[in-house]
């Protein structure tokens, strides 16, 4: 039996990855390690908690002793590392917590894996899940490829870039078998409503202003989270050691166009007059260091592993919006308490 550690499995993407692995690989023992920060929520994995090949452990990857003890108790065959501080705006307010989790936390996992596996790396794999933000910002043309130089601009992307470098350094220096992926913006169910799409869905439902940063012409490449989970499964099982794969949706949208589309779909679903939700659009102060455009060239993973997105943006958005309508309690729970303080501070 394979024993797999998935970190950050109570978060947005992590919960989809854990669900996929637990359901698809009953022969694996999946350990979900998560500190349950504001972004982690056991409700995100409630549907699988009873399954015999699944176990949740609450713990902090920054705690070196805890991580070393965890590895000495469990003989892991593989690690899928998703735990992170993930929100750019929070990294601007509190960069150090991003260094702690994203850099030190990753180092603790790398050290523990190296020490446990060093006598025989065969069959072992450390999979680091990263972001396209490490490549910096594109102008109007061009795409990020796996050989694009790193040029991070936010404390978040600088911390992810640093962790990526350490993963590769452990591969080169100690022979640690790793794979690494850099993915574009995800959207879908269980997405915490601090990020653009779920925040705007929640605000449209509640008739609150839609705070578009700057002129709204910033561009992102959007990928349905379940397609990201499929890609992660594929890379974990079939990717080549010491390789990097870019993952993206081939789906670029200017923020303002995306927001208008969201308003249109939501008007139909809420039975509002067309154009009603668009009246909520409010241009607000720009994000400092705001990257102009991200766009991924995902041809390597397509050619080498046969992956491509399975869901169109229209289908994915429809599924996402329906999920938020069907899970009002989830949305209410995560937007009570500390969220209100965060929102007030960020948007007042
Ligand atoms: P998220 O913020 O929704 O979830 C992060 C999870 O990590 C939470 O469950 C949280 O409790 C946990 N966590 C945070 N600090 C921890 C710590 N010190 N110890 C243990 N657990 C901790 O993030 P996400 O959007 O699901 O992103 C997951 C990973 O994918 C991150 O590494 C992120 O950089 C990367 N990524 C995200 C996107 C995206 O669009 N969301 C795109 C590309 C890559
Ligand atoms: O590209 C991958 C990255 O995508 C991930 O690594 C990050 O973890 C994830 O948070 C996401 O980063 P972004 O900064 O691109 O996502 P966010 O949803 O915060 O913002 C998307 C765009 O929308 C960005 O141009 C900023 C803008 N925006 C965002 C918010 C929250 C607004 O205009 N208003 C807002 O209130």
Image: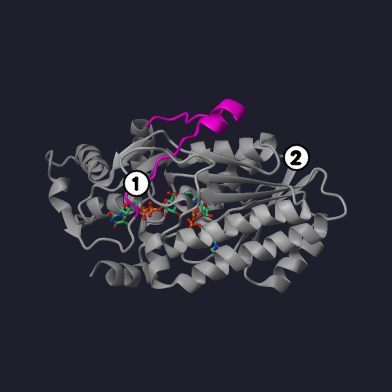
Q: Which label's residue is closer to the chain start, 2 or 1?
A: 2
Q: Is residue 35 visible?
A: no
Q: Residues within 10 Å of mark 1 (few under 14, many from 20)?
A: many
The reply to whether the residue tagged 1 has its Cβ within 8 angstroms of ligand 2 is no
**Residue 71 in the image, given as x and y percentages of width and height:** 77, 62
Between 158 and 50, the one lying in front of the other is 158
Tell me: 27 left or right of 103. right
Q: Is residue 305 magenta?
A: yes
Between 242 and 266, the one lying in front of the other is 242
**Residue 89 in the image, given as x and y percentages of width and height:** 37, 63
Q: Nearer the viewer, mark 2 or mark 1?
A: 1
- At 73% across and 43% down in the image, what residue appears? 28
**Residue 316 in the image, given as x and y percentages of width and height:** 39, 35
Label placed on residue 27: 2
- At 44% across and 65% down in the image, what residue appears? 155
Residue range highlighted in magenta: 291-312
Occupied quadrant, residue 251: top left
Occupied quadrant, residue 342: bottom left
- At 54% across and 41% down in the image, what residue appears? 146
- Callout 2: SS: loop
- Callout 1: SS: loop
Between 37 and 308, the one lying in front of the other is 308
* Coloring basis for residues: one colour
Q: Is residue 256 magenta?
A: no
Number of numbered discs on residues: 2
Quarter occupied by the C terminus: bottom left
Tell me: 20 left or right of 344. right
Residue that label 1 marks: 293
Q: Is residue 167 above or below residue 296?
A: below
């Amino acid at each position: 039996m394979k024993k797999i550690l998935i970190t950050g499995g109570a978060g947005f993407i992590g919960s989809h990855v854990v669900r996929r692995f637990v359901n698809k690989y009953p022969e694996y023992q999946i350990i979900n390690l998560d500190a349950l920060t504001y972004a982690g929520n056991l409700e995100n994995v409630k549907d699988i908690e009873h399954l015999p090949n699944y176990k949740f452990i609450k713990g902090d990857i920054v705690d070196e002793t805890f991580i070393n003890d965890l590895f000495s108790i469990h003989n892991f065959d593989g690690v899928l590392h998703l735990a992170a501080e993930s929100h750019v705006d929070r990294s601007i307010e509190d960069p150090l917590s991003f260094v702690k989790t994203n850099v030190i936390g990753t180092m603790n996992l790398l050290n523990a894996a190296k020490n446990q596996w060093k006598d025989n790396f065969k069959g072992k794999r450390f999979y680091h899940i990263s972001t396209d933000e490490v490549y910096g910002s594109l102008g109007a043309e061009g795409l990020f490829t796996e050989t694009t130089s790193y040029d991070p601009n936010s404390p978040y992307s600088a911390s992810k870039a640093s962790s990526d470098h350490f993963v590769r350094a452990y591969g080169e220096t100690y022979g640690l078998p790793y794979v690494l992926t850099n993915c574009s913006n995800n959207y879908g169910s269980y997405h915490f409503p601090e990020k653009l799409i779920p925040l705007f869905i929640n605000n449209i439902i509640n008739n609150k202003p839609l705070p578009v940063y700057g002129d709204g012409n910033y561009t992102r490449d959007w990928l349905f989270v379940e397609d990201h989970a499929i890609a992660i499964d594929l890379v974990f099982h079939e990717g080549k050691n010491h390789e990097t794969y870019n993952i993206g949706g081939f789906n670029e949208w200017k923020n303002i166009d995306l927001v208008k589309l969201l308003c249109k779909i939501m008007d139909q679903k809420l039975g509002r007059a067309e154009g009603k939700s668009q009246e909520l659009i409010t241009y607000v102060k720009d994000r400092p260091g705001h990257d102009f455009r991200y766009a991924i060239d995902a041809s390597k993973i397509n050619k080498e592993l046969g992956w491509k997105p399975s869901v169109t943006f229209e289908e994915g958005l429809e599924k996402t919006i329906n999920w938020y309508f069907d899970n009002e309690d989830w949305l209410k729970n995560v937007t009570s308490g500390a969220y209100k303080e965060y929102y007030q501070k960020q948007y007042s």
